[in-house]
Image: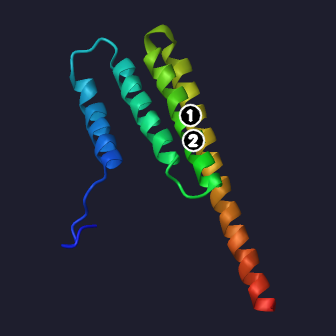
Amino acid sequence: MTSAGRIRPTGLAAVTGVLGLLALVTPLGGAEYPASRIGALLALAAAVEVLHSFRRSTPSSRGTGTAGGMISMAIALFLINAPFLAAQALRVVIAGWFSIDAIRCIVAVVRSRWARASTTTALEYA
């Protein structure tokens, strides 16, 4: 934040925003395979995600960020190769990858809540 209270976007946030806007307008273009273009944009976003994960403070959060970036990169590779894959198979693979990522995030949330609850319980009995 700046001294005037306005939020100033960082370089990574600006790059991510531009990539998101490009992904939104890609299907409106005249591309024969817009999924390939979106895959390329997702690959760039995955690279930004991995670079950002190096800036995280703890080793576990760096590992989590890197894993998320690698999952995004795998999805990007499938989208880039979309013209050569069956459409239904592509949907199933991408849904599977997002499911794996969602389960990974849910497990992290449950573990952190359990750790906080056990710490709170230990402090109550101390």
Pick the front one: 3 or 82: 3
Mark 2 Cα shell of 10 Å, populated few (<14), some (14-19), many (≥20): many
* Residue 43: x %, y % from top left: 43, 28
Q: Secondary structure at mark 2?
A: helix
Total labels drawn: 2
Pick the front one: 14 or 80: 14
Mark 2 = which residue? 66
Mark 1 = which residue? 70
Which residue sits furthest left?
4
**Quadrant in the picture for the N terminus:** bottom left
Q: Is residue 60 left or right of residue 5?
A: right
Residue found at x 52% / y 54%? 56
* Residue 125: x %, y % from top left: 81, 90
Image position of 10 with respect to 19: above or below: below
Query: Could you tell me if the residues under marks 1 and 2 are in contact, i.e. CB atoms within 8 Å?
Result: yes
* Residue 2: x %, y % from top left: 24, 68
Q: Secondary structure at mark 1?
A: helix
Residue 48 lies in what quarter of the image? top left
* Residue 40: x %, y % from top left: 39, 23
Identify residue type, mark 2: Thr
Residue found at x 65% / y 56%? 108
Residue found at x 50% / y 40%? 50
Which of the colour schemes (rainbow, by chain, secondary structure, one colour) is used?
rainbow
Q: CA distance from mark 1 to mark 2?
A: 6 Å
Mark 1 Cα shell of 10 Å, populated few (<14), some (14-19), many (≥20): some
Which residue sits furthest top?
84
Identify residue type, mark 1: Met
Q: Is residue 23 left or right of residue 118?
A: left
Residue found at x 67% / y 61%? 110
Q: Is residue 65 left or right of residue 10?
A: right
Image position of 43 with respect to 116: above or below: above
